[in-house]
Image (cartoon, grey):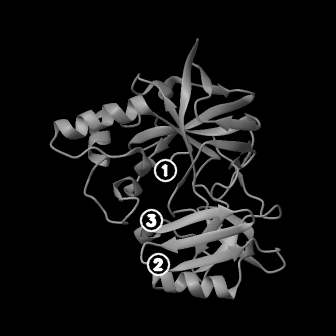
Amino acid sequence: MSSRFKVASLHIHPVKGMRAVDVTRAQVEPRGLAGDRRWLVVDPAGVFLTQRSHPRLATIDAALDGETLILATDAGASIRVGTPDGAERRRVVVWDCEINAAFAGKAAAKSLSAMLGEEVELVHMDERALREKASVWTPSPVPVSFADAFPILVTTTGSLAALNEDIEKHGGDPVPMARFRPNIVIDCDEPWAEDHWSQLKIGDVILDLVKPSDRCIVTTTDQKTGERMGKEPLASLARIHRSTDPRINGVIFGENAAPRTLGEISVGDNVSAVD
């Protein structure tokens, strides 16, 4: 059965863990939305850093100006980093994946280290930086950026409304959608409808919804200040939306998606959801 909705908003995260950029249109590529999570902060050993261990990442704006990445803090510090030519490379690790990424250079590493207060490096996912996600959720490996799991994260307005209703019922403050760091937000009044969708069609783009998104401490982090805000929304999700799939242990919000066909999508586009 098919239902029709609209794209409520689109978001990219140029650097994994840093602030999101709201966009009105986006190109869907094999690795996800163009410009999404193609840059990564790593420690000196090449291990990826996220808001799980470094919530301060949420205090840094990350924007793309053509081939230049611009990083800025609310205090006024800023860095401009050109896309590296890929001559110098780093072996980096994201979960169980090793990636041969392009090193953004010592100057960028020094400036970003000053922003974060510890020694870090910045790398870029160019065409040579291959990463594929092999799992029980897809019949074959899926190309992916530096994202945690799959190329695109889809959420819905109805599920956020249901979640916030429960949070407020138990005396808490509602949370914004930004806490979940989605790429595509669908305007859909029915809570948790996405749990039952197998596919989305947005114009010529077809997305396979391959895995529910299990959530972690990042959702408790204010996406402007980097401050941990308590137990919500995890506490409410534990009450109303725990995983019923034995392959996922914990709470879920949103769906991971992999592109079947590519193209451009825009805010306001019609969406056909297939159960």
Quadrant of the image occupied by residue 264: top right
Label drawn at residue 76: 2
User: Is residue 123 found left or right of 10 in the rendered image?
Assistant: right
Residue at horizontal 78%, vertical 64%? Answer: 126
Q: Which residue carries the number 1 mark?
A: 181
**Among all residues in the image, which is located at the extreme top?**
1
Q: SS of the residue at dot 2?
A: loop
Quadrant of the image occupied by residue 38: bottom right
Is 230 situated above or below 171?
A: below
Q: Amino acid at mark 2?
A: Gly
Residue at horizontal 72%, vertical 44%? Answer: 27
Residue at horizontal 65%, vertical 62%? Answer: 64
- Position of the C terminus by quadrant: top right
**Disc with the residue nearer the chain's start (2 vs 3):** 3
Gap in Å between the C-alphas at discs 1 and 3? 11 Å
Residue nearest the observer in this picture, 40 or 135? 40
Label 1 near label 2: C-beta < 8 Å?
A: no
Q: Which residue carries the number 3 mark?
A: 58
- Position of the N terminus by quadrant: top right
Q: For label 3, count other residues whose C-alpha is less than 10 Å away and answer few (under 14), some (14-19) or many (20+).
A: many
Q: Amino acid at mark 1?
A: Arg
Is 104 situated above or below 217?
A: below
Residue at horizontal 75%, vertical 45%? Answer: 30
Front: mark 2 or 3: 2
Q: SS of the residue at dot 3?
A: helix
Q: For label 1, count other residues whose C-alpha is less than 10 Å away and answer few (under 14), some (14-19) or many (20+).
A: many
